[in-house]
Amino acid sequence: MLKVGVLGAGHLGKIHLRLLNQSDKYELVGFYDPSEENAKKVSEEFGYKSFESVDSLIDVVDVVDIVTPTLSHFDCAKQCVENGRHIFIEKPITKTVLEAETIQQLAKENNVKGQVGHVERFNPAFTAVKDKIGNPMFIETHRLAEFNPRGTDVPVVLDLMIHDIDIILSVVNSKVKNVHASGVSVISETPDIANARIEFENGCVANLTASRISMKNMRKSRFFQKDAYISVDFLEKKSEVVRMKDVPKNPDEFAMILQNAEGVKKQIYFENPDVENNNAILDELETFADAINNNTTPIVSLEQGTEALRVAQMIIDCF
């Protein structure tokens, strides 16, 4: 069982503490939070051991779960990795691409593993259809959220859109060719709503919209590929696959058939894959334990976290 400690006991940090405490793959040693008041409150309320410094926590664990504000990710990760500790680090991996690349290099030098908390990879609506997504050529995503002051220390691209950037990069097997984007600051100092168009070398185009000032929450993605359309509702945890196949010789009288201008007929088939309930955060933490124990590559590697940040930064640079 891996000994784990958590850096940061804010809203998300407390969720991580609770899940690590109930996991069979980790032994939760304790946490560190720079706010003495918050550390005392969390320790008294939940019974987790509070450490007085990052150093004292690192000394007694195998894995460090970094759930601190993005601005401190680099310093925390660097300290952990240089001390030979595996790191799970919340998204975005760091504030800058250079910082992320540095952490990658340090992890290799110190022979430790790292995983980035792109939790939507573990969303059951996505995992139910990800194997059906093959060579998509057009992707459309909408990630809209009602306003919440938490998270506004970074642009909406790093706060929300980066989830979809990571998902897209995980299914498009091609390099990014061009990025066009626009963003508007409405209530924050950084953009609250943004739209981006990512063009890939293989011809795939992805159109992404993210907003944190919406009247309703929405997290939907649509993937279009040859003879298929796949939709994923990350919020409602539903997915659908619509396939077009050649019309059989004797189609059912209720079959839905389309005919194009060239006279080619296709029959439409609808699939609603079974979506199993899960706790995506627990899954990402436990698969990281598996990667450490089995010496395999984490599902969301430091390299992939860096690429998501790189594309996010390209989008931000357009503003």
Image (tube, rainbow, N blue to C red):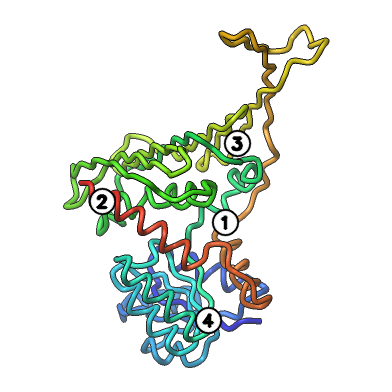
Q: Give the residue at the far right of this rendering.
A: 250
- Residue 190 — which label? none
Q: Please tell me which of labels 1 and 2 falls first in the chain.
A: 1
- Per the model, the C-alpha gap separating discs 3 and 4 is 36 Å
Q: Position of residue 299 (x, y in %)?
A: 58, 62
Q: Nearer the viewer, residue 240 or 46?
A: 240
Disc 4 to disc 1: CB gap under 8 Å: no
Q: Please tell me which of labels 3 and 2 falls first in the chain.
A: 3
How many discs mark residues in the rendered view?
A: 4
Q: Position of residue 179 (x, y in %)?
A: 32, 44
- Residue 280 — which label? 1
Callout 3: helix, strand or loop? strand
Could you tell whether 264 is left or right of 285 in the image?
A: right
- Per the model, the C-alpha gap separating discs 3 and 1 is 16 Å
Residue at label 3? Answer: 239
Mark 4 surroundings: few (<14), some (14-19) or many (≥20) residues within 10 A: many
Q: Amino acid at mark 4?
A: Val
- Per the model, the C-alpha gap separating discs 4 and 1 is 23 Å
- Per the model, the C-alpha gap separating discs 3 and 2 is 30 Å
Q: Amino acid at mark 1?
A: Ala
Residue at label 4? Answer: 112
Q: Amino acid at mark 2?
A: Ile
Residue at label 2? Answer: 316
Q: Position of residue 141 (x, y in %)?
A: 43, 38
Q: Nearer the viewer, residue 155 or 113?
A: 113
Check the image and report above or below for 79 versus 192: below
Callout 4: helix, strand or loop? loop
